[in-house]
Amino acid sequence: MRTRCPQCGAQHEATEAQLARAGGRVRCGRCGAVFAAGPVQQELFPQPAAEDLAPALLAAEAAPRRWPWALLALALAAALILQAAWAAARHPVRLAPLRPLAERLCPRLGCALRPVRAPGRIAVLAHDVRRHPDDPRALRAQVVLENRAPHPQPWPLLELVFTDTGGRVVAARRFRPEEYLPPPRSPTEPFAAGATLRAELDLMDPGPAAAGYAFTPR
């Protein structure tokens, strides 16, 4: 059967068996257009040379079916998204930009998001250490903390270091959240983004060698 390209007018010839293998569609060897083959009137068009017919049919027969590859690409993309969400849940600090994706997908995947710890984003706004009003051997320390991270985070360890006039450490201690959080605050309750906390601590006097001190969230 002879057919004609509706795009450029080129003629092509194919057998019924060839058209069946190509799904009844032909790719034009001249302009590349793919069209449904249909018979044309032989007297309206001159007989093309045989070498002009073969490329069109072969091109149509060799035309790839792209939909399986498209499905494979979608499946791979979905797998990568799920893997990224799982990784963000396991490594919240290194993959912080992926956390919003993990927060949306983890409830469906059954994974639990680890809290993001960023003690470096907790600022010490004010502090004070004075003699304890009831015990001459003790001190009372007060500190105000602010979470400047854009997300809630666990309460930090609160480190208090006393140094002498030469900057050498005289005494140091790290307080756990349950030691410095005032009631009714709970260590399991996250430190909300932008929130502040005023804490008060009673501790033993490190002695006359202590000339300075510093609070550091850890």
Image: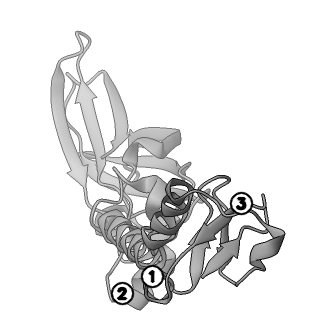
Residue type pointed to by label 3: Ala
For marks 3 and 1, the one nearer the N-term is 3
Mark 1 lies on a secondary structure that is helix
Which residue is outermost to the right?
44
Residue type pointed to by label 1: Gln
In the foreground, 194 or 125 = 194
Residue 112, given in percent of the width and then of the height, sits at 33, 80
Q: Which mark is residue 125?
A: none
Left or right: residue 200 compared with residue 19: left
Marks 3/1 in contact by CB < 8 Å: the verdict is no
Residue bearing mark 3? 10
Residue type pointed to by label 2: Leu
Left or right: residue 53 compared with residue 9: left
Dot 3 crowding, Cα within 10 Å, few <14, some 14–19, many 20+: some
Residue bearing mark 2? 109
Residue depicted at 74% across the width and 76% down the height = 42
Residue depicted at 41% across the width and 40% down the height = 130
In the foreground, 76 or 83 = 76
On screen, residue 103 above or below 171? below
Residue bearing mark 1? 18
